[in-house]
Amino acid sequence: MSSLDLIDASRVIISLVMLGCTSWIDIKTREIYDLVWVVFGSLGLLIIAYEVWIGALSITSLVLPIVFSVAVSILLGYAGLFGFADVEAFIVLAILNPFPPRSLRPFLGITSAIYPLTLFSNSALAGASLALVLLTRNLLMAAKGRRLFDGLGNDSTLRKLVMMTTGMRVKINDVRGPPFQYPLEIPSGDGGDGRELLLMPDIQDDEAAEEMFQRLRDSGVEEVWVSHTLPFLVFIAIGYVLTLFAGDLALSVLSRFLLS
């Protein structure tokens, strides 16, 4: 194995260790300390400095993948599509993996010209797959006779379909509450006993979410729709593995469609 292959292996191992640790923490607490990203980002910068020093990389070749990836990560974070920890993870991964490993060939054979964009794409697809899991779970519950929308008024079929792919119905006494679960229904505004679906929970106000869950308990509700906050670092880890061994899933499908 050449020295460059060892460098690439170091990048991959460090990335996998980082994603494994942070995914576990994300599942358990939903809170990642910034020091974690500082440590792993520093390791990535040290590897870059070493490669530049031995002449394996030029600083100019690093500008596009890293600066572009940092900019995209920050923009997606401000747009509310990713949490702050997810943004930091993408930035550190762009530093650790500005280019694909030199001796590893993904079986689809396609990656983005800006390598970290393949990671963005695969992670997003992995996260979107959760909608299918939720839909399957809810359909199975409905098939067993569970009345999923009892007491929720006359919401449209479209709103109910969105709820089936973004939320889950759980017993009110089993609700974990913030930062793991947020209410997807609220008492009806007409002052009656009914409730209304809430498609976009406010995940910025944990106190309001706890208060809403308590109001639902006090009203005698036995089951409630909740949004289970996405431990997205898990899907970033899945996206990273897919990027290494499969390549760019979206680009592969697109290229096959265009060439067919």
Image (cartoon, rainbow, N blue to C red):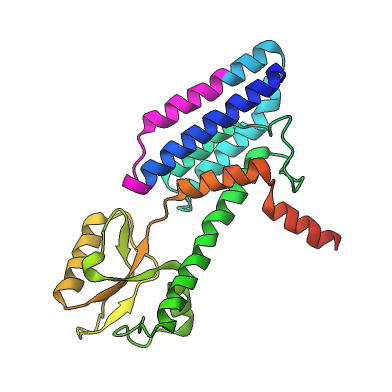
Q: Is residue 252 left or right of residue 85?
A: right
What is the quadrant of the N terminus in the image? top right
Q: Residue furthest left?
A: 218
Q: Residue furthest bottom?
A: 154
Q: Is residue 35 magenta?
A: yes
List x then y, in percent, for residue 82: 47, 49
Say which of 253 and 57 sits in front. 253
What is the quadrant of the C terminus in the image? bottom right
**Residue drawn at (46%, 78%) of the image:** 139
Q: Main secondary structure of the magenta part?
A: helix
Q: Which residues are magenta?
A: 27-46
Q: Is residue 34 left or right of residue 162?
A: left
Measured along the vertical axis of the image, is residue 67 above or below residue 202? above
List x then y, in percent, for residue 94: 58, 34
Q: Quadrant of residue 208?
A: bottom left
Q: Residue furthest top?
A: 53
**Residue drawn at (31%, 85%) of the image:** 150
**Residue drawn at (43%, 74%) of the image:** 138
Say which of 79 and 135 sits in front. 135
**Residue drawn at (42%, 47%) of the image:** 83
Q: Is residue 57 visible?
A: no
